Amino acid sequence: MVASAWGAAAKPPLVNYCHESYSTAIKACGAASLLIPTDQDPSDLQNILQRIDGLILGGGVDIHPRRYGEMPLPGLGEVDDLRDRMEISAVHQALKLNLPLLAICRGIQVLNVTLGGSLYQDITRQQPEALLHAPSVDKAVATHTVALTPETCIQRLMGRRRIWVNSQHHQAILKPAPGLRVTGLAPDGIIEAVELPEHRFVMGVQWHPEGTLPNDRYAKKLFQALVQAADARQTKD
Ligand code: MN
């Protein structure tokens, strides 16, 4: 703790950052990426989203439970209200713009909450029978399987019914939002993948595909699909 000249604790400066694995994944698919800082006016955010071809909502801290109508329960982690506000606004605007969207880990939760769904604030406390979804292993290590729903975008993309994924989350979708299709389940029934069928490309995964690259072709397929959807949009619009 650092004391300021006034005797009160100094507030540490906020830092916008993104793990390099995300930009490396996008680069590996032949596209360029940029980071959108958290503190945006809605009109500036709209201007930014109008100038890009695809959006990734990445991993991070918990969403404030008030965003899905709940009070904090034991087990809730750190929250970032400013980031919640910016990302919820970004989802609304991205859907209006039909911007291809890949929502990863916290991202799938932001997508679900924005559309009216709810979350487990802490899987272990609310679902004691569940698998360990936040093991102390590197992001590159596959942890559990996900069964993909037949005839969904992600199942067609992967070309198989079951894939191995890493798992670095203590929260997950509890009540899926209206309109959001559940497309992948862990063996314990925890929701691991969703999509919005009426949109060009809106996919959410609870795992971290950027963490298992470059040795996981099923992880790469997700980023390739996002980049292809972004390219197709650029050609058509
Ligand atoms: Mn998991």
Image (tube, rainbow, N blue to C red):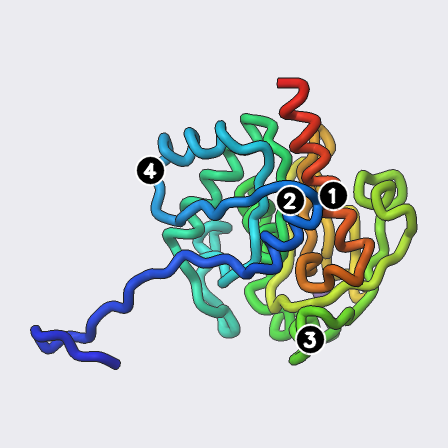
Question: Could you classify mark 2 by the number of other residues whose Cα lies within 10 Å: few (under 14), some (14-19), or many (20 or more)?
Answer: many
User: Where in the figure is residue 227, as x and y percent of width and height?
Assistant: 68, 38
Image quarter of residue 208: bottom right
N-term mark: 1 or 2: 2
Label 4 CB sits under 8 Å from any ligand 1 atom:
no
Q: CA distance from mark 1 to mark 2?
A: 11 Å
Q: Is 35 placed above or below 146 here?
A: above
Q: Which residue is mark 3?
A: 128
The kind of secondary structure element at disc 2 is strand
Who's the residue at 56% across and 59% down the image? 20
User: Where in the figure is residue 56, as x and y percent of width and height?
Assistant: 58, 46
Question: Disc 2 vs disc 3: which is toward the camera?
Answer: 2
Mark number displayed over residue 102: 2
Q: CA distance from mark 3 to mark 1?
A: 36 Å
Q: CA distance from mark 1 to mark 4?
A: 31 Å
Mark number displayed over residue 41: 4
Q: Nearer the viewer, residue 71 or 15?
A: 15
Q: Is 213 placed above or below 43 here?
A: below
